[in-house]
Amino acid sequence: MYQLWRAYESYEGRSKFSSWMYQVAINTAISNLRKRKRKAPTQRLSEVAFQIREKLPSIDYREEKQFLYQAISHLSAIEKAVVILYLEEHSYEEIAEIMGISKTLVGVKLNRIKKKLRKMIVPHFS
């Protein structure tokens, strides 16, 4: 909220107010993530973390959702922002406006993100 208040003077009205708010929020979140990355070392994801074949018959929706969000947490900050907006059912146009990129680039990024997530998830469900 503080960042929105500080940035309000920069709102020019060229886009929807909600899109501008998302952009400020995403930029703030990305800045905070970058600060945290400088402070805390990241851990490399091991294959053991995704060894769930034995649990497949009993997996439920909550576990699948948790597994997806765990995989998303290993994406870059920009990729996380794009995929979360997509999961919130924003259109490519809205995502492009919020992220400050073209609609075509949104599609390219989403395809690359989906491939990354498939590599992390699909082998463990087959």
Image (spheres, rainbow, N blue to C red):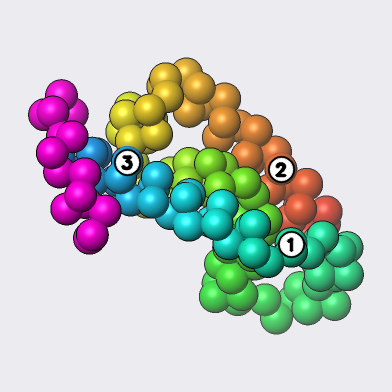
Give the percent coordinates (x, y) of residue 79: 56, 42
Quarter of the image that includes the N terminus: bottom left
Residue 73 is labelled as: none
Identified by mark 3, the residue type is Gln
Based on the picture, tell me whether residue 107 belongs to the magenta stretch.
no
- Residue 114 seen in the current view: yes
In three-dimensional space, the C-alpha distance between marks 1 and 2, rounded to whole angstroms, equals 18 Å
Check if mark 3's residue and mark 2's residue have beta carbons within 8 Å. Answer: no
- Residue 83 seen in the current view: no
4, 89: nearer the viewer: 4
Q: Quadrant of residue 123?
A: bottom right
Based on the picture, tell me whether residue 15 belongs to the magenta stretch.
yes
Q: Name the residue under label 3.
A: 23
Q: Which of marks 3 and 2 is nearer the N terminus?
A: 3
Identified by mark 2, the residue type is Lys
Q: Mark 2 points at which residue?
A: 116
